[in-house]
Image (tube, grey):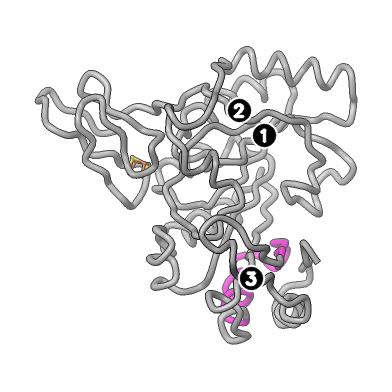
Amino acid sequence: MSSSSTSGPIICDVCWHHCAIPEGGVGFCRARTCRDGRVAAGNYGRLTSIAVDPVEKKPLAEWHPGCRVLSVGSYGCNMRCPFCQNFEISQGGAGGVPWREVSPHELVDLAQDCARRDPTVIGIAHTYNEPLVGWEYVRDCSELAHEKGLTNVLVSNGCASTHVVGALAPLLDAANIDLKCFSAEGYQGLGGCLDDVRATIETLGTSPSCHLEVTTLIVPGLNDSEAAMRQEAAWLAEIDRSIVLHVTRFFPRWHMADARPTPISCVMRLADVARECLPHVHVGNC
Ligand code: SF4
């Protein structure tokens, strides 16, 4: 993290936005702040959502089927997808959404409790909002969770700097990364950076300890071309043909509440296109 002895804004290096944050202010993600001249995760340990979910709901289709994970999220996100399914927490800040403080020790204790009561609970998932804007909490919880024999799951837009993903990769047992489209312009329109997401997928897709699945939500007009899906699937296959791809159906939400759901036939057709390169393709929300 960048720091300085001056009282001017400090640059956050967690993602491509490189926000200049004044003392006490927040970055574009509304999660990171500047305290005592240093950038910090203002949302550290502040949980807005906590639930025990089947791994299939993350979605993870080919990792410990039938098991469950204690799933937690905070607030904040560094993207602005108009179709966000979790906009209440992803686009909220500290004052906009209720949260409660849960330390890494408390979270791991809770997960162990859940696992004692239900042996299908095998770990903790960081999900719901964008976990990487508060990556230090993911790191601290994941280190403790491994010490206690629990697994760690990350569900993320993957839009973070390489030093963040590199620090977390050895701690992750499974991840699902959104690949929202395969165009730099498309990503810019959503407030993200395709190159960073590609780097994240390459890092996790080649990590010996992390099972990787990728999700592409098919939004009409954004990413529903066969050519783009063919390019995406070919690129994923170059990294590792065993990467699992979810091709999922969009439902109207947030700024796209008036849009129509993606036709099921479109999702099925694009999944078939992806199967030309990848043997593990699943459809979702159909
Ligand atoms: S993580 Fe947040 S504060 Fe840091 S650069 Fe990205 S959007 Fe800005």
Q: Which residue is mark 3?
A: 218
What is the total number of numbered labels drawn onto the structure image? 3
Please provide percent x and percent y for residue 181: 53, 70
Residue 164, image x and y in percent?
43, 41
| Residue 25 locus on image (x, y percent) | 26, 30
**Residue at 43% from the left image edge and 34% from the top image edge:** 93
The answer to whether mark 1 and mark 2 are in CB contact below 8 A is yes
Q: Position of residue 53 (x, y in %)?
A: 78, 37
Secondary structure, mark 3, is strand
First in residue order: circle 1 vs circle 3: 1
Distance in Å between CA atoms under marks 1 and 3: 27 Å
**Closer to viewer: mark 1 or mark 3:** 3
Tell me: residue 24, above or below residue 232: above
Q: Does any portion of residue 206 appear in the rendered image?
A: no
Quadrant of the rendering where the N terminus is positioned: top left
Q: Is residue 10 left or right of residue 210?
A: left
Q: Residue at x 65, y 47 (%)?
A: 175
Residue segment shown in magenta? 230-247
- Tag in front: 3 or 2: 3
Task: Give the quadrant of residue 155.
Answer: top right
